[in-house]
Image (tube, rainbow, N blue to C red):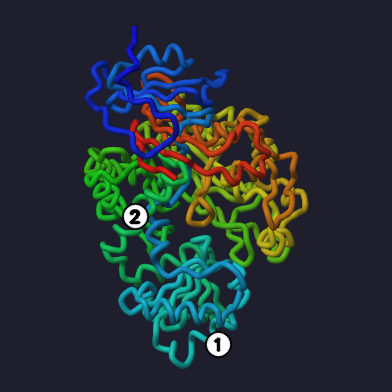
Amino acid sequence: MFNFKNTLLVASLCPFLVSTSWAKNGVESIYVNGKIYTAKDNASLQQAIAVSDDGTILKVGNNAEIRKLADADTQIVDLQQKVLMPGLIDTHIHALISGVESVMATMDEGEISVPAVVEKLKVTQKDGTAVYGDVLVLNGLSSEYWELEEQLSAVFNHNEWKNQPVALVGSDHHTAWANKALLKKAGVDKKFVRQLTAEDQQNIRHNQKFEPTGFLVDSGWDIVSEKIPSVPHDLMYKGSKKAVQELNQLGITGWLDIASNASPLQGIFNIKNTENTVGVIPMYKELSEKGELTARVSGLHIINSKSTAKVLDTLQVINQKYNNIENFKLTGMKVFADGILEYPAQSAALIGQYSNSKKSGQLLFDPQVFKILVDEADQRNMLVHIHAIGDKAVNESLNAIEYARSKRQSHVAHTITHLQLVDPKDYGRFKQNDVIASMQLAWAYEDGFNKTLVKPYISQTSYEGMYPAGSLVKHGAILAGASDAPVSTPNPFIAMAIGMTRTAEGGSYLNPSEAIDRETAFKAYTINAAKALGREKEIGTLEAGKKADMIVLDRDIFTVPPEQLAETKVVWTIFNGKKIYQR
């Protein structure tokens, strides 16, 4: 008979749990009297869970059967009917870069004003957060600023700024504006623009004389950003550590870092495929070695969209060099199929045309070359994660994966992300070709940004069909949750709420018929996300043999209205069986 006399009974979620790593039978802790969501199919809520001293789940069940596993040294935590669920997982995030940017100079949200930019730049120049060698960099500008290009030029190309290189970086990370001093430093002048292909000229806005105006898109920004000095190590470490801690506080214990070989201030469209292009991978190694990487991370290499299959040899060399990092593994590559939909960039590839320009955007890869690349990656068991915003980009991405699937059923977790526009004819192809749909559900509502920068330039049918999460799920697609932070909030509960309601505070409804249900939202950030990381055997559900990455919440997420779901707070975050955050 089990003797409770000497057992530590925790009557509430309190901070003074003692270590029991020497529990006699290997049961370090049990959690009882909870609403335990396992994320397993057809599994009702459970009451209790047992965790071993090595951070592995031993059993999930009712209070009585789990209590039987404890001995005199086992911690017993009374959940008091609080919800416990798997740690949440983000399938598209610039995690460490997000943290680094948070300690760099970043424009405040609010009124769109050039004087506000000037003031912010002066303050951050003085405190040093905007200073990178001889260049001043201000991040986080909304695309709405690019309509003020003449005002930006009138200020930052004259007087005190005339000889000071300045970069204003868009919050979308696809657009930027550089003054003449920085363009000169980068060698971008009318002679340079004139010799570019017509396709590349689109990414450096210029007048009829080929003189660049300063507005840059995608590869155009890459060319200029190469001339900006790198972020110092101490700032990189400070921001990276902060990123992990803040994601843990949101209940996030795993993610797909889709730009592990990129660095802050570095462009991402012209990534050089060399063994030296490692970006933040060494920072993950440093965090891991210091015991500060409290998350399971799958990292991807961004590769140039025009890469051939030869690039995979280089990636495998890098993977081999960094294959021994605890909690971090390199699993594949990320490719851009196109750019973004918003005006004035309009670089997303459409089946139709933008109403103002009568152009169709830009497909960044050659479809035939890309098919061979995806096929070769699939043969090597390397995950392919594709940025596709426009419906043509989605269609061609599906074509490439379909080609690989026709050769073999490898079940490698290939993913298409963003999916702002999807041709209805392609809805069913996600299930048919075992493609995961990684979606930023926090974007799936109508705000002023969409009203002014998207709606006027595409058809009403396309606009109302944006972010078709509901249709994809109805056609059998596996939906995985993602944030694209720092582009938008990394808070999964906000994204879940918007995905379920198709609206948000300060916004309007965007085609409520595309809403998803509660269970779909929860699985998008648990088991489905684990599949997108290629880690479904380790995490994503609460069941025997998996890692005890879990969170305890402040409300009953199964009964609160969706709007209140957005306000959910994490009480505890548990990683590998250990509490790493307490609210």
Q: Indicate the quadrant where residue 154 lies.
A: bottom right
| Mark whose residue sits in front, 2 or 1 | 2
Residue toward you, 324 or 69: 69
Q: In this rendering, is residue 395 above or below 133? A: above
Badge 1, how many Cα within 10 Å: few under 14, some, many 20+?
few
Q: Which secondary structure, mark 1?
A: helix
Residue at the (43%, 12%) spot, across then down: 65
Q: In this rendering, is residue 236 above or below 130? A: above
As drawn, the residue found furthest toward the right would be 460
As drawn, the residue found furthest toward the top would be 1
Which residue is the site of mark 1?
154
* Amino acid at pointer 2: Ser
* Amino acid at pointer 1: Ala
Q: Is residue 391 left or right of residue 19?
A: right
Residue toward you, 516 or 230: 516
Q: In the image, residue 163 lies at what x, y percent?
A: 40, 88
Q: Indicate the quadrant where residue 142 lies.
A: bottom right
Q: In the image, residue 504 lies at what x, y percent?
A: 67, 51
| Quarter of the figure that contains the C terminus | top left
Residue at the (57%, 46%) spot, across then down: 440
As drawn, the residue found furthest toward the bottom would be 159
Would you say residue 174 is visible in this rendering? yes
Mark earlier in primary sequence (2, 1): 1
Q: Which secondary structure, mark 2?
A: helix
- What number of labels is visible? 2
Q: In this rendering, is residue 537 above or below 253? A: above
Q: In the image, residue 106 lies at what x, y percent?
A: 46, 68
| Quarter of the figure that contains the N terminus | top left
Q: In the image, residue 269 lies at what x, y percent?
A: 43, 58
Which residue is the site of mark 2?
240
Task: Check contact, mark 2 vs mark 1: CB within 8 A.
Answer: no
Q: In this rendering, is residue 267 above or below 333? A: below
